[in-house]
Amino acid sequence: METLETRELRYFLAVAEELHFGRAAQRLGMAQPPLSRAVQQLERRLGVRLLERDRRGVALTDAGEMLLHEGRAALDAVTAAARRTSRAGATDGTGARRNRLVLAVKAAASHELLHKLLDAYAAEPGAVEVEVLPSGTCEQGEMLRDGRADVALMHTPFNSLAGFDSEELLTEGQIAVLPAGHPLAARASLSLAEVTDVTDLPLARWSHDGTYPPGPGPEIHDQTQLAQLIALGRTVAVFPDSARAWLWSDHAAVPLTDAPPVVTHIVWPAHSRSLPLATLIRTATRL
Amino acid sequence: METLETRELRYFLAVAEELHFGRAAQRLGMAQPPLSRAVQQLERRLGVRLLERDRRGVALTDAGEMLLHEGRAALDAVTAAARRTSRAGATDGTGARRNRLVLAVKAAASHELLHKLLDAYAAEPGAVEVEVLPSGTCEQGEMLRDGRADVALMHTPFNSLAGFDSEELLTEGQIAVLPAGHPLAARASLSLAEVTDVTDLPLARWSHDGTYPPGPGPEIHDQTQLAQLIALGRTVAVFPDSARAWLWSDHAAVPLTDAPPVVTHIVWPAHSRSLPLATLIRTATRL
DNA sequence: GCCGGTGATACCCGCCGGGTATCACAGGAC
DNA sequence: GTCCTGTGATACCCGGCGGGTATCACCGGC
């Protein structure tokens, strides 16, 4: 039966995302005609219409929608295989095997926990070098899926653990981080509603791949920016307890009574079978 | 950077499984020299030695081991994408869309539950046709992974739910199924140890892709065979409670006190996003 | 020493993936 | 109406590479 080469998958995904053969071809660094032909071949091979060609533009059929989702996952799995394999065979300058573990963590989260974990793991027999890979807002899942990382620290309810194996490490409450002088900063505790309703301190909007959600708050893409804006009395933010570690003297932290607790998990691809990874996980759960 | 075509993956997996270029080439329906060359190209492209070539035979390096595992998963994902896509676009004779759900179930398990589930789902608005795919001993996981199935009923602790999303449906105890005339059949309950220690009734050995684990028990590959052997007083078996439904008059069922409970789950690939599937899952959890 | 069997090499060919040029067609502007 | 524009599809050509056959290099064993 069919084979579905990854080249065809890449081609189809480009077209399905751009919904335009010309732009897709440009993105792929090739001309439009062979791209059209390749997609037609793919459709014939699968015996399925993937795209509804209209005179101006392209639309996905149901089958195309399916291939868009499944194909992304498949392509991620393939590039993950390639990446992990070349990492597994990498050697350092001296030719010695250099078997690293790549751990993806949200940029400025859980310094405390991370420190303890790395120290404890380094003391384990058979520990390998751990490369800490700071990842953007919520992309640890992607990094595990496409092989850029072998294991990650994730935080529910912000990250989804779907499709991975995980172990719970730490549960913490959340705090509101306010300008030190703000009236609410004197309170012993706050509710989520009280924080989101403060009209003089609109919640900041994080950059999601270049675009910002609509709203009144300032646009940021960096935790330091946020800290500064809070210190300047321009906004307020909600963070897990452990964020107290990086607060400035201009900041005030007030516990939130009704915010969902943040649970830190150690997460890895379900099919992983590597001794160093197993050791790291065991170390983590014993903290 | 690299691309890793699925053709190369298939070739490498064949060699890694056979540990022999000649046999692998035969299995792939091609000659040995181009296969050797393809694997060399793959190694160069990844910058990694995958195989340790010895004069007689081949051994996997660590990187090769990694690519064997990751590559299998990746190839499964690719074929899953192909299968699900062509299913999503399949039409019946009249040209009407024929959107089925494929449900994998262990051959003779949970008739009761399955029946209720299918009936309840058929009554839901927007229900599509459900194809029930009887799967071998424990291969529902593979079927979900490579796209032969969209959703499965699995039974812990026999199946592993790793890498999937799941919901619990039903918990049941286990029973020993004995020949009706056997002394132990009169007992009100038994322990696992008592059952496994009965030397005149050695536990049967199930076929695992053509081979059998070592042991004294009879070799079987079919539930009817097992039922017959029990009725003939040649063996004993352990099953979930629901197996009572298919017992013969020559069989006796005795509850086991210390056997782990069997939990039936409904299981699906974590990234699934289909309305019919969501409906089926919701129906199942409401049973 | 010869033979069998391993994987690697050499060489050739045909196919197919990619390129350029062009077409067919639908909307708009006027 | 008649352009013009921009879409995807078609026609055709070429080079590379995937696959084949023949052969080599090597080693273990009878």
Image (cartoon, coloured by chain):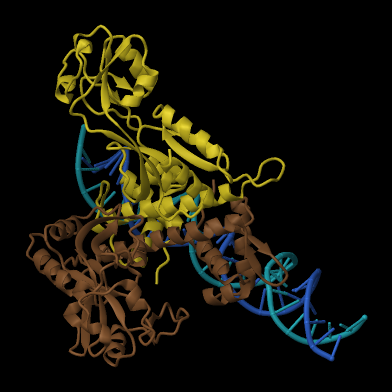
Chain colours: A brown, B yellow, C blue, D cyan
Q: Is residue A96 above or below residue A44?
A: below
Residue B41 visible from this viewpoint: no
Q: Quadrant of residue A227?
A: bottom left
Residue A134 location, x and y as percent? 27, 75
Which quadrant: the C terminus of chain A? bottom left
Q: Residue at x 60, y 70 (%)?
A: A19
Farthest residue toward the top? B181
Q: Quadrant of residue A223?
A: bottom left
Count of numbered marks: 0
Which of the pair D14/B97 is nearer the observer? B97
Which quadrant: the N terminus of chain A? top right
* A59 on left or right of B38: right
Residue B99 location, x and y as percent? 59, 46
Which of the pair C19/A253 is nearer the observer? A253
Residue A77 visible from this viewpoint: yes
Residue A31 location, x and y as percent? 60, 75
Q: Residue at x 32, y 49 (%)?
A: B16
Q: Is residue B65 above or below residue B44?
A: above
Farthest residue toward the bottom? A232
Which of the pair A208/B60 is nearer the observer? A208
Which of the pair B254/C16 is nearer the observer? B254
* B276 on left or right of A277: right
Q: Quadrant of residue B161?
A: top left
* A281 on left or right of B271: left
